[in-house]
Every structure is written in C-alpha cells, then in structure tokens.
Image: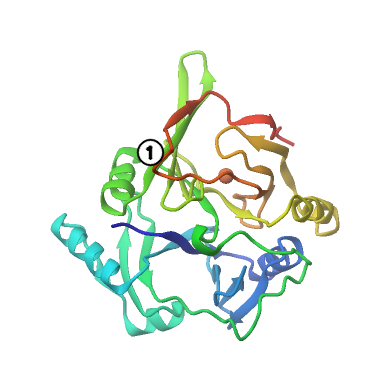
Amino acid sequence: MGVASLGYIGFEVSDLKAWDDYLTGFLGLMPGHGNGASARYRMDDRAFRIHLDKGAADDISFIGLEVETPEGLQALRERLEKAGVPCAPASDNLKKERGVRDLLVLTDPAGLQVEVYVGATALTNMPFHSPAGVSGFMTGGQGAGHVVLASEKIDENRDFYTRLLGFRLSDTIGMAISPDFTLVLEFYHCNPRHHTLALAPMPAPKRLHHFMVEMATLDDVGFAMDRIGACGVKQTMTLGKHSNDRMVSFYAATPSGFEVEVGTAGIEVHDDVWRVTHHEAISMWGHKRV
Ligand SMILES: [Fe+2]
C-alpha cells in the first residue's frame, strides 16, 4: 500500500501575474480559483493541479500525493506512525483549501512539505478548457506529471519515498560530470507513469530542478514551442527524446527560474514485466542546452 499519484504541485512564487500568463498563455492550463494571494490552475476535471502562493521562495513549496481510498490513507498513517514519522492530520481549513476529504501533512527529509490525501474535488460540471488550445494533458491515473527534486539527502529521501510512501525504482541515469565523477539520477514510479519523482543527489539553490507536464499529442508540444516567442519565454533545452521514459520534450525557464519540461508520449511502466535498468545518457537525441 502506497501513494497512487502526484495529485498536485504547490509553488511559492514572487510574481503571480507572470506565472498566470505563463501557465495559461504558454502552457495552456485553465485558471481555477484564486484570491490575489494564491491561485490555482487546472489540467483536467480536477479543481486544480497547480497551486501558487505569493512569496519570496520561487521554488516548489509542497506536493500532494493521492491515495486511492480512505482505508489506504489510514493504512499509510499507521505505517508512518509505526516508523516514527510525524504525520499531522490537516486542519479543516487546509482540507478545505485543497478541496480534499482527508489529508495528512508530512515533511520529507530534505524539508519539502508532502501532503498525502484522499478525495480530491472533481469539477465534471465545469469541463476543462485550455485557453491556449492544448487538446489535453495526460493525467488521470498517472497524476499531474513529474517533479525532479535536488537534494544532498538522497539516502534519506530514497528511504522516505520508497519504504514509507511506496514509490518503486524505474531506472537510473549516470551523468558523467568529470572523468572522476558521475552523478546518478534515480527515477521512481507509483503508477504507470515512468517516473512521478526523480531524485538528483546534488546541492542546488532550489529544491526543484524541474517539473513536467505531459500533453496529449506531439502537435500540442509543437504548438507550445511555437508560443515560446510570442509569450516571451526562455527555452532552455531543445526538443529531444529521453533515454529512459522516451518522453519527447523541450524545456523552458519558468518565471521563478527553475524549469518546466513540456513533453508527450512517455512510456508506461508495469511492475509485473518491468526490469530496472541503467542508462549512461539522459537523452537518445536532442535536449541540447540553448
Ligand atoms: Fe523530466
């Protein structure tokens, strides 16, 4: 029993207006509820997939990990308590703000707030409509996308996300930084999405290296590339295809400095037939720094 998907991502950002333009005009997310100090954005029938709070961090501030059933959440809570991991039931206010029926608040070993919840609000009466014409995002059982977290506490984070929360290793990629040093990135799944979480064992100015949104078609990604100039966005990596999840994607800088990966056609991982492998390159082709 573990978590089932990345339900939502929270960012603390200094420029809400720039992010609003970026998420709606460039990435094509649909505005949800906002109040001047925070704003939410939709990718599907859920009330939100991305939550912004105004603040100075310009970094990821929380992730929401979804559990399938109330019984699953209770079982997870018992496992965490048995392991001595503090997990506080959320206040009614926080549950209301997130629009979920039940929620536990944890902190990962690197200090990121992790919200494990059940019962997210679905707005099937208010269909998703992309303001930029994106035909759809790959979400559903695969969740909102993926996050790549940079931290020197990789041993602790690995234990937290795998043994306690149920993530499974998909594969690893070795990046040769110098003749004597190879950085090994670890990719983890909790549903058929190849990776919902990747851990990068390195010190970094921000917790988040990048987050990824998966669009329904290659044309959606192509049209997003065509919006780069018009939206004043800085592309950071060319179109390419990753070696492990085979995602065809490009990267761009967000208004907070960290990057977004805009991709399509990532492969699925099924535990009964999947074998953990190791790659020596990040990409099959492309993904050159701009
Ligand atoms: Fe990625």
Q: Dividing the picture into quarters, in which one does residue 152 lie?
A: top left
What is the number of callouts on the image?
Answer: 1
Above or below for 209 versus 16: above
Asked if one can make out residue 144 in the rendered structure from this viewpoint, the answer is yes
Expressed as whole percent of the image width and height from the top left, the position of residue 223 reads 81, 55
Q: Residue at x 37, y 44 (%)?
A: 168
Say whether residue 156 is left or right of residue 137.
left
| Residue in front for this viewpoint, 103 or 149 | 103
Above or below for 97 versus 5: below
Q: Dividing the picture into quarters, in which one does residue 113 lie?
A: bottom left
Asked if one can make out residue 202 in the rendered structure from this viewpoint, the answer is no
Say whether residue 217 is left or right of residue 170.
right
Expressed as whole percent of the image width and height from the top left, the position of residue 95 reads 38, 80
| Residue in front for this viewpoint, 204 or 222 | 222
Above or below for 136 versus 287: below
The image quadrant where one finds the N terminus is: bottom left
The image quadrant where one finds the C terminus is: top right
Q: Residue at x 37, y 72 (%)?
A: 118
Classify mark 1: residues with Cα within 10 Å, few (<14), some (14-19) or many (20+): some
Q: Quadrant of ligand 1?
A: top right
Q: Dividing the picture into quarters, in which one does residue 103 lie?
A: bottom left
Q: Amino acid at mark 1?
A: Glu
Q: Which residue is mark 1?
A: 152
Expressed as whole percent of the image width and height from the top left, the position of residue 12 reads 52, 64
